[in-house]
Image (cartoon, rainbow, N blue to C red):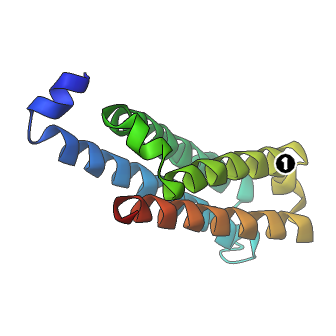
Amino acid sequence: MFTALQSNPWAYPVLEIVHIFGIGLLLGNLVLLELRVFGRGAALPVKELARLSLGLAGAGFCLAAASGLLMFSTQPGELLANRAFTLKMLLLFVAGCNAAVFHARGSLQRLDRTARVLMLLSTLVWLGVLCCGRWIAYR
């Protein structure tokens, strides 16, 4: 796979497009769900909206993770030495922990202040992931 990424001039740019598409699916659907948690679109049932948006967000995460791993494989040493990359990986871990806490406490059933704080934190952390990902090329 590594040689295919290096030998085909279209392979890496297509991989980047897949990565960006996955990020768009992930973040767009998380923001949609966050808006509902904050009371917007109150006519939409939370359970059904969550099932749809979290499914699409999960698919987006899988696309972004798979394409990200392939991009990482082309230059692991360089990326591991890049502070923006290491910060991005730390923020991904924080995002995963935050999601685990959100779902473990049943936040979608409660829609309380803590659920809103966790959703806002999620959005801010994912924005940080996005910024770090973009910054990798400039570090």
Q: Residue at left 63%, top 56%? A: 49
**Picture quarter containing residue 12?**
top left
Residue 17: where, in percent of width, then height? 27, 51
Q: Which amino acid type is marked by label 1?
A: Val
Res. 7 visible in picture: yes
Q: Secondary structure at mark 1?
A: helix
Q: Residue at left 42%, top 37%? A: 77
Horizontal arrangement in the rendering, residue 23 relative to residue 54 (left or right): left
Tag count: 1
Viewer-proximal residue, 79 or 20? 79
Res. 44 visible in picture: no
Q: Residue at left 81%, top 46%? A: 103
Viewer-proximal residue, 82 or 55? 82
Quadrant of the frame with the C terminus: bottom left
Residue 88: where, in percent of width, then height? 56, 54
Quadrant of the frame with the N terminus: top left
Q: Is residue 127 above or below residue 59?
A: below
Q: Which residue is mark 1?
A: 101
Residue 113: where, in percent of width, then height? 90, 71
Q: Is residue 117 above or below residue 58?
A: below
Viewer-proximal residue, 32 or 12? 12
Residue 40: where, in percent of width, then height? 68, 78
Q: Residues within 10 Å of mark 1 (few under 14, many from 20)?
A: some
Horizontal arrangement in the rendering, residue 46 relative to residue 16 (left or right): right
Q: Residue at left 90%, top 66%? A: 114
